[in-house]
Amino acid sequence: MTVQSIKEVDKFALQNSLKNLETAYKNFFTDLKKSKNKKGVGLPKFKKKNGCKKSYKTNLTNRNIQVIENRLKLPKLGWIKFHKSQDISGQIVNVTVTRTSSGKYIASINCETEIEKYPQATQNIGLDLGIKSYLVTSTGEAVDNPKYYRTQTRKLRKAHKKLSRSQKGSSNRVKAKNKLARNYERITNLRDDFLHKLSTRLIKENSIICIEDLRVANMVKNHKLALSISDASWSKFVTMLEYKALWHDRIVQKVNTFYPSSQTCNHCGFINPLVKDLKLREWFCPNCNNYNLRDKNAALNILSEGLRILSAAVGAPDAIYACGEFVSPDLFRQKSLKQESRDF
């Protein structure tokens, strides 16, 4: 890189790139100490012309970043027209400019602001994530799985075919590549919109959300279900629930992966080993003759197990939460803070 090219970039972009490199090395060495098989976070690699995220971050100082209506001021670039997706409130901290694979430029503006919390909810809920239905709640609600990738398979196949048949270095190949990138970008946007709306609604309506701790990395090793699991994007959905719960004083409680939620009868607690077969969607309990729908039964068991874990964590009797009654998140936080102070 020449001296002239360094002058064309603002100083914060260079400083942030060095900070990112330092963070990458710290993550690598920390993971190397923890993992015995020396796998996980890899060694930082040099950026390539293709296949890397093209972005830079700049920080606010001396009003070098400003937003007025549909114009954005950035260091070294000056005033730029942009489409504002939402109103900006609070103090601007930094801006990250990213170039997507479809050729669009996105400015992510990070601000410090007070989040207006949702009103206190009085309902607790258990969620059973799946493929046929995206999730089934303990109240019996089933949310359909949109399967955005599978619905767009025909368009993707056509775009891939056009790209593979175009001549390398030609303008038609560039157009085909951009069109393919736009198709993938549309799938991502549709999926993110669905996950945001669903997670926001659940956080609004419920005080405690109990969910199974899924090991997606192990589940995708099943090649028959890998595509459907990846298309569902369960990890991103759980991440959205967790950070929105922190914003609005809710609790997301995870249940152990090996807890037999589908095999256990929610009425008497009998474990039916025959329910391991995924084709069995409904069954009668041999012990109490209770009729169980597989997914709803799993959601009810996840709810009761999650509330049991929470009550055990704060030292409360299990009987208080046996029927899934309202539990204040503030009560859990106060008791957990007292317990942490005692341990300290």
Image: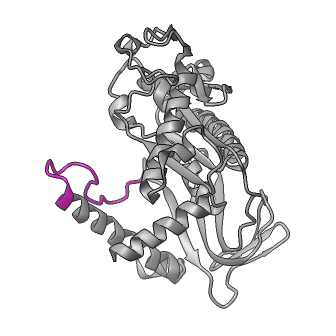
- Snapshot quadrant of residue 34: bottom left
Does 339 lie within the magenta span? no
- Snapshot quadrant of residue 178: top right
Residue 1 visible to the viewer:
no
Tell me residue 300's x, y (percent).
55, 30
Residue positioned 63% across, 57% down in the render: 328
Q: Is residue 144 above or below residue 216?
A: above
Q: Quadrant of the N terminus?
A: bottom left
Tell me residue 13's x, y (percent).
50, 75
Residue positioned 45% across, 22% down in the render: 262
Q: Is residue 70 above or below residue 305?
A: below
- Snapshot quadrant of residue 155: top right
Q: Which residues are magenta?
A: 32-50
Closer to the camera, 106 or 236? 236
Q: Quadrant of the C terminus?
A: bottom left
How many numbered marks are there? Answer: 0
Residue 303 visible to the viewer:
yes
Q: How is the image coloured?
A: one colour
Residue positioned 85% across, 69% down in the render: 69
Q: Is residue 23 above or below residue 207?
A: below
Closer to the camera, 1 or 18? 18
Tell me residue 163's x, y (percent).
52, 28
